[in-house]
Image (cartoon, rainbow, N blue to C red):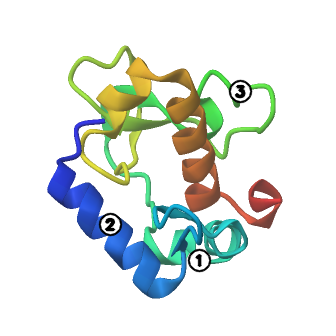
Amino acid sequence: MGVSKTEVNASIRRSIDVGLAIKDRESGYPKANKRALLEFVVHGLKYVFPAKPAEITRGVPTAFSAPMLQKELSSMGDYIPVWPWAEGEQKGQAVPPLFKTVPKAALHDNRLYELLALTDAIRLGNSRESK
């Protein structure tokens, strides 16, 4: 995914500190606190990681324009939202990704791409998209 081990470790520690992750009783390894994570994604994500489409650029389609969501959700305007990336094949409005390596990582893992595109649909959308 292009994220260093140090960044991953720090993220896990922060997640445990705020209750988005918990330590498994048997193994001691961290695991997602699904209830808290869902609540955060649905109600807090767009406030903590706001996404405002910006300039027209080349990139990787996200949110409503991502291949796996095109038939599920409708677009909000004339231009599609894209994560800026020089090697991207689509033109659209730039949407800052959650992390700088998101476009490349998403193109290497379809499931990750789907989850990140859904996340951006929530960041960009209204309550209908959150549901």
Of the numbered discs in the image, which one, if any, rests on residue 90? Answer: none
Dot 2 surroundings within 10 Å: few (below 14), some, or many (20 or more)? few
Tag 3 secondary structure:
loop
| Quadrant showing the N terminus | top left
x then y, percent, for residue 23? 51, 72
Residue type at mark 2? Ser
Relative to residue 27, is residue 96 drawn left or right? left
Residue type at mark 3? Gln
Dot 3 surroundings within 10 Å: few (below 14), some, or many (20 or more)? few
Of the numbered discs in the image, which one, if any, rests on residue 11? Answer: 2
x then y, percent, for residue 95? 40, 48
x then y, percent, for residue 87? 24, 17
- Judged by depth in the image, the label closer to the viewer, 2 or 1, is 2
- Judged by depth in the image, the label closer to the viewer, 3 or 1, is 1
Q: Residue at x 76, y 38 (%)?
A: 74
> Which comes sooner in the sequence, label 2 or label 1?
2
| Quadrant showing the C terminus | bottom right
The alpha-carbon separation of the residues under discs 2 and 1 comes to 17 Å
Residue designated by label 1: 44
Residue designated by label 3: 70
**Residue 83 lies in what quarter of the image?**
top left
